[in-house]
Image (cartoon, coloured by chain):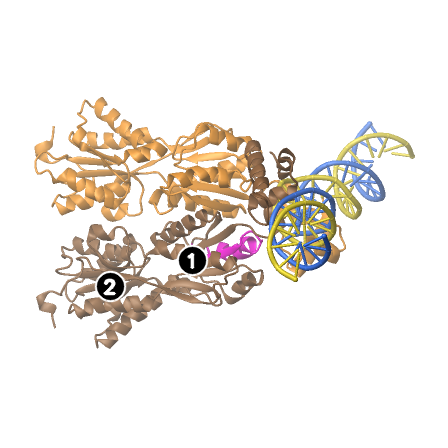
Chain colours: A orange, B brown, C blue, D yellow
Amino acid sequence: MPGIKDVAELSGLSVATVSRALSGKGSVSAESRERARRAAAELGFIPSYHAASLASGRTQNVGVVVPSVHRWYFSAVVEGISATLLDAGFDLTLYNVSEDDHRRRNILNDFLLRKRVDAVIAISLELDETEIQQLLAIHRPIVGIGGPLAGASTIRIDDAGTARAAANHLIQLGHSKIAHITGHAMYDQDFQLPGTRQQGFEAAMNAAHLPVRPEWMVTADFTIQGAYATARKLLGATSDRPTAVFAASDEMAIGTILAARDFGLRVPEDLSVIGIDGHELGEVFGLTTIDQDARGQGTLAVELLLAGLNGNSADPGHHRSYPTEFVIRNSTAVPPAADRA
Amino acid sequence: MPGIKDVAELSGLSVATVSRALSGKGSVSAESRERARRAAAELGFIPSYHAASLASGRTQNVGVVVPSVHRWYFSAVVEGISATLLDAGFDLTLYNVSEDDHRRRNILNDFLLRKRVDAVIAISLELDETEIQQLLAIHRPIVGIGGPLAGASTIRIDDAGTARAAANHLIQLGHSKIAHITGHAMYDQDFQLPGTRQQGFEAAMNAAHLPVRPEWMVTADFTIQGAYATARKLLGATSDRPTAVFAASDEMAIGTILAARDFGLRVPEDLSVIGIDGHELGEVFGLTTIDQDARGQGTLAVELLLAGLNGNSADPGHHRSYPTEFVIRNSTAVPPAADRA
DNA sequence: TTCACAAATGGAAGCGTTTTCACATTACTG
DNA sequence: CAGTAATGTGAAAACGCTTCCATTTGTGAA
């Protein structure tokens, strides 16, 4: 493998000049630059990132910590991150921490701190304050997506507001018997998302002076199949079932629709369903939802990060609210006549 | 940041001994090892991977090239890879190349060759022979999953055999009017998967002396929504519609089931549907399928790779067939009486 | 007891870049 | 036209480890 030395020799320049010519930093005459380029190409020179990183302290690599790439939201965000990073010439080191807690706790120490990454993006993952401080202490910008991250910059949609909007949509249609499917409490520990959306839902209900019935507040694991099972129980009761369901994710909304179909309930005539996400499958089911453009959130995170790395400090600790878009399709309608106010 | 020098000083050992003690390589007395450990812990010493890589030539990092983590199969494989790699103390650099061809072509040169990774796992992605040779030339083992990779080790299920088995299942139930939904030809370019499965289907049909009707050979993009649209066209014809559909993926099978429901077709009474994958949603739809354990494929790939890195050369160029499991649920049954042989 | 050999250790030479520093040019300013 | 500033360049010092080599010490075989 040819090194920069060989390029220097062949081009008749010094190692230093070749380095400057090839990296574009520092002043080099046009002629030298061209000579260096030509020699490098001729030798098939490929700079060693490790050597460059060691010498410069920059790694051109960002770490992405994510609960599971096998889930809709996370993989969408990762796609956005990946594309943006790749274009900027950065590598992306993926830490898919799954549900394994002990493993997760070690990620930080074992990997993130080892000067391997220039920055960290944490998706829906709570790091405690000391962990964040550790990272910031070694000058590694962090941005969090979808979860609160004390001390770091974060991007997230207005979960409470979005939930309120979804609930209000149902309320305005005339529904009063509204159920809510949210994530299991275990997810709350990290994302605080189920709780926040639930609060939004309750706020809307209270504002409309509608009762929040405990037996209609159910949970699932954010997946279609999980919500399907939950919704079957919810809708199985032959008497006194809700006329509308607000699911905290599109996948759970779809699970609900599938369960409703099993019972011969027509959506939206017999049951209105609304979700949050903007899932690709929404169209197939005619699902009314609030699109949160997960991919775009990933892109924005990288842009923030890169700006931070370039010194244009993206004022750390800033919390950014990502915009959402209401998508009305045909899974929501006025309630059945018997249930109208 | 403390360096290994500081640890040496504090422990009263030499830098060399500390390095050996902490890495576990070379012979160090139990006492020295303990002293080094203690000093490192006290200082909060975190070794620099870049320096280590530069000095040793090993990076403890493997590159994973994947078309899109937003798709079921790929993200499942990545999960398997990630978990296994993490346990082995390796980093995983993700190259999510999406559909962007120019970007994809540059990944290799821009990233993979730069001595950044010890090995490469390519998922359903065809590298041409020269690219593979380049990687092998710099001693980077490659393993391919789900696609043919000349010159590298590969893992894949027996696509033709699996397709044959799926088709035979339908044939044995008595179906003769069988349609096949496979991936668009554009995917064939990389994975050669749609084509291979289609050939398996055709082989089974021919063996049973059943006609392969061109208008019943349709394609979609491997997703539920894509197959849904395709299946609506396929099943929309009121007369002379197939009594069974073999979809090349579970997601496409599910899309087909949803389309069938739209037309009031009961599955399996009016239409049998079978897929390939082992998708989590299969259970909700009672889908008969052939489970290919995508996660397990990822795990196996890493094991092969690590064995290769440890010198136990996993004989490169070896092609491994990954086992599949037939899962019979209730989306397949004998054809309607009118269509029975 | 002596010799050969293994185990344990430290010194120092890399690994392949970037970057600082010093110096020589060349180009401006008034 | 002197004097200052910018520009282009090379030598060499980092960067923070691993590992080769040489040396010392301890052990069992002869």
Specify whether B304 is left or right of A6: left
> Is residue B120 in the magenta section?
yes
Earlier along the polypeptide chain: callout 2 or callout 1?
2
Residue B198 on image: x %, y %: 31, 68
Chain label for disc 2: B
Disc 1 crowd rating (10 Å Cα; few below 14, some 14-19, many 20+) is many
Label ID, residue A341: none
**Is label 2 or label 1 in front?**
1
Magenta range: B99-123
Disc 2 crowd rating (10 Å Cα; few below 14, some 14-19, many 20+) is many
Badge 1 is on which residue? B301
Residue type indicated by callout 1: Ala
Residue at point 26%, 70% (across, down): B214
Badge 2 is on which residue? B246
Residue A322 on image: x %, y %: 39, 34
Which quarter of the rendered picture does the C terminus of chain A lie within?
A: top left
Front residue (pair B214, A314): A314
* Residue contact between numbered discs 2 and 1, judged by CB atoms under 8 Å: no
Chain label for disc 1: B
Q: Exactly how many numbered labels are in the figure? A: 2
Residue B45 on image: x %, y %: 57, 36
Quadrant in which residue B176 is drawn: bottom left
Specify whether B172 is left or right of B119: left
Specify whether A67 is left or right of B290: right
Identify the secondary structure beneath mark 1.
Answer: helix
For residue B171, say whether it is visible. yes
In this view, B311 is above or below B33:
below
Quadrant in which residue B46 is drawn: top right
Residue at point 28%, 28% (across, down): A200
Residue A303 on image: x %, y %: 49, 38
Residue type indicated by callout 2: Phe
